[in-house]
Amino acid sequence: MATTEKTRELRTGKTYHDDLAIVREELDKCMKCGNCMSVCPVYGADKLETSVTRSKIAVAEAVLDGELELDDPQVYEMLFNCLVCKSCMTNCPTKVNFDRIMLALRAALVRKNGLPWLKKMIFSTLKHPKLFDAGMRVGAALQGLAFKTEEGGKAISPRSPFARIGGPIGFDSEKQMPGLNITPLRDRVPEVVKVADATMKVAFFTGDSLNYFYPDAGQDLIDVLVANNIEVHIPKAQNCCGVPVLVHGDIETVRTLARNNIDTFDKTGCEYLITGCGSCGGAWQHDYTEILAADPVYGPKAAYWAKRTYDISTFLTRIIKLRQPTGRIERVVTYHDSCHLKKSMKVSAEPREILKGIPGITFKEMSAPDACCGSGGSYVLSHHETSAVIGRKKAEDINRTQADTVSVGCPACMMQLLDNVHRSGGKQEVTHFISLLAESYRREKTGKDSGR
């Protein structure tokens, strides 16, 4: 964050999430050069100038100058027709932090008009973890009414007539997605997984996706840590990281979630916090420090954890010395860089290092591995057609590698790729890279090779 921005936030007690004027400095950096056009996934799909970052910056300037209203329907559409994938930021010669601009605009819109009733209802449950958990369990128990099981139990698809009703937002009969698990990850494991002669102890932030949709991947992450003599703490009181709420402008809910998570993990006494999701890790490394920058109590606490939060791949390869696996897995694997993992957490080489170190794996790089998959949380629902175009391009890149497995470091990307690989006719298994490492460790014990 620029020094002048930081000074203003400390002086006013507000962050750019509270005061749109604070991002004026970011707006002034933009030269309107258009370099963002070549990497923006939305522009690549619809070829509209209004989709490009420089156009959205021009709109932000007009809003600050009083020439446009935030709740103008066209302005509103521009604000939310963005994945906040940060691709534009990687190609910007003047290093405009566009994510701050977009988040500030959406937060200003919420301050002006409040949240739509549905978002307000959903986001409010996140502040009450027991209520949210109960809702997810009810959903898991009843999902069979609306969805049928596909792919040998690995996915679910909408039943008719739900497929006809959900068609406009992508929930047609071809849709494939992970089902909610009857037994979430945090119910499967104790709060502390002890290890004899542990070299250190770490805390694992599961996030909601690994907890409810991909508990097997979460268990794999724990197993890998244990295989490396690490004691793992998984606090049951942790809640959503808040990123799904942050991108919709509900800043006060995010602050509540952040403070609750910080309090929960402070109690673990652990030196490191480990994540298996780029969005969750990015929240701890960056978002919490920014939204709590003016908080005299939680600002320093957020900064403490930001320095101690690592993606599982970085922790294994940079903080400790990974115990090299010996179990063979005969697979051809490619890897997709999730936007938040690479562009927020700066993690790219580490997962590849892990994958290439697994005996039997043949690694094949796809074209543009860090191109956005088009998920963007709720973007896949609100802008289904654009998301589908982006996802189809990614699936084509995967298919061209002729890999039988596509590995990912983000559960949301796993969901998007599962659906789009299926729709493209591909047969690749979509898995978290940590699950392949866990499988190799398991193969050491059985002495058996693993195919698909």
Image (cartoon, rainbow, N blue to C red):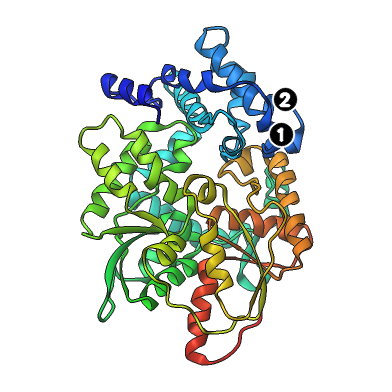
**Side (left or right) of 236 relative to 410:** left
Q: Nearer the viewer, residue 253 or 407?
A: 407
Q: Quadrant of residue 134?
A: bottom left
Dots 1, 2 in contact, CB < 8 A:
yes
Dot 1 corresponds to which residue? 43
In which quadrant of the rendered image does the N terminus lie? top left
Q: Residues within 10 Å of mark 1 (few under 14, many from 20)?
A: many
Q: Secondary structure at mark 2?
A: helix
Give the mark, 1 or 2, whose residue is nearer the N terminus.
Answer: 1
Query: In this picture, is 283 found above or below 96?
Result: below
State the mark number for residue 86.
none
Q: Nearer the viewer, residue 352 or 47?
A: 352
> Looking at the picture, which amino acid does disc 1 mark?
Tyr
Percent of width and height locating residue 133: 39, 55
In which quadrant of the rendered image does the C terminus lie? bottom right
Q: Quadrant of residue 136?
A: bottom left
Dot 2 corresponds to which residue? 49
Q: Nearer the viewer, residue 401 or 91?
A: 91
User: What's the CA distance linking mark 1 and mark 2?
Assistant: 7 Å
Percent of width and height locating residue 300: 24, 40
Query: In this picture, is 267 found above or below 82?
Result: below
**Side (left or right) of 41 relative to 299:** right
Percent of width and height locating residue 85: 57, 41
> Looking at the picture, which amino acid does disc 2 mark?
Glu
Name of the residue lying farthest toward the bottom: 447
